[in-house]
Image (cartoon, rainbow, N blue to C red):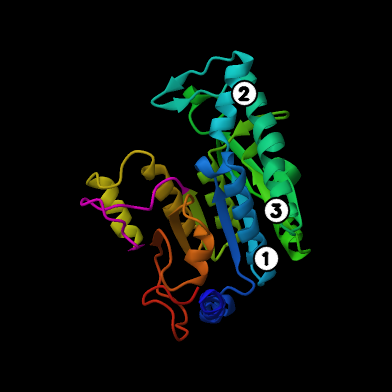
Amino acid sequence: MRTQNMNRDWIATARTLSEALPYLQRYSGAVVVVKFGGNAMGDDAAMAEFARDIVLMKQVGMNPVVCHGGGPMINDLLGKLGIESRFVRGKRVTTKETVEVVEMVLSGLVNKRIVQAINDAGGRAVGISGKDDDMMVCEADDPELGFVGRPVEMNVQIIRDLYSAGMIPVIAPVATGMEDNETFNVNGDTAAGAIAGALKADRLLLLTDVAGVKDASGEVVTQLHPDQVRTMIADGQIGGGMIPKTETALMALDEGVRAVVILDGRVPHACLLELFTEHGAGSLIRSTEPRVKPHGLRQGEAGL
């Protein structure tokens, strides 16, 4: 009986791989920007699982680009240093003193943890920030918030050079400003959206701590058109922390990203479920119909 059960398990694994074929073909050579954040960043097992999934994406011919956040780690170090945080309309005011801590945490601790996890999983990751090669140039998003940046210029050739050379770029959302020696903290979702837009990425995956965009009844909406998103924001169905995520999605689509998916990063192998299975994961937002519809793909989601 034990042998029969084991055989069934292996057959199921083989069937899963076979059923993934059209998705593997569809995403060959595709650029996929993944925003990694939330609770998974503080869990070693979740970090290792995420890293393996990113390495797998690269192994099957995709070009994954990882952009990350790090808010809880920033809060922790600010507390240890005795630096008091001030908030305006629920958003942290980033002073010159604070932005130095932000850069240390994001470009140092968090970025290198992700790089190491990907390398440990057999990938070739390189950690950079928006400052490298002036990749992301910002201006103040709101003077009241201090050094919180809004990207105004993107120079993403360094990212293309890295993934073309077989590397996996891991990007910290810290940017340079228009003035000399100016540093900005950039919201991780905002940075990922700007990077995806500049790369004209095939997919932007925003990993979060919720299942996706929910309607008035609390059900996850699996597919959305930008007009639907705007309506749901206007009538209050989309609120709180989901508003900036959906606004990032709309901005990315306007910049040329084919589709954006907001999905639950707490679900094991969330990225693989979205990219390589008929089921998908989270809420997919796109403004155009798919270009191709290979046999076996879920209706409305086939093709890039």
What's the residue at 51%, 75% (across, down)? 5
Disc 1 to disc 2: CB gap under 8 Å: no
Q: Which mark is residue 281?
A: none
- C-alpha distance separating marks 2 and 3: 24 Å
Amino acid on which the number 2 mark rests in the picture = Leu
Q: Nearer the viewer, residue 249 or 241?
A: 241
Q: Earlier in the sequence, mark 2 or mark 3?
A: 2
Q: Which mark is residue 77?
A: 2
* Residue 95 x %, y %: 58, 20
* Residue assigned mark 3: 118
* Residue 119 x %, y %: 75, 53
Residue that lies at the very extreme toward the bottom in this rendered image: 295
* Residue assigned mark 1: 58
* Label 2: which secondary element: helix
* Label 1: which secondary element: helix
Q: Earlier in the sequence, mark 1 or mark 3?
A: 1
Residues in magenta, as a range? 208-223
Residue that lies at the very extreme toward the right in this rendered image: 165
Q: Is residue 166 above or below residue 266?
A: below
* Mark 2, other Cα within 10 Å: few <14 / some 14–19 / many ≥20: some
* Label 3: which secondary element: helix
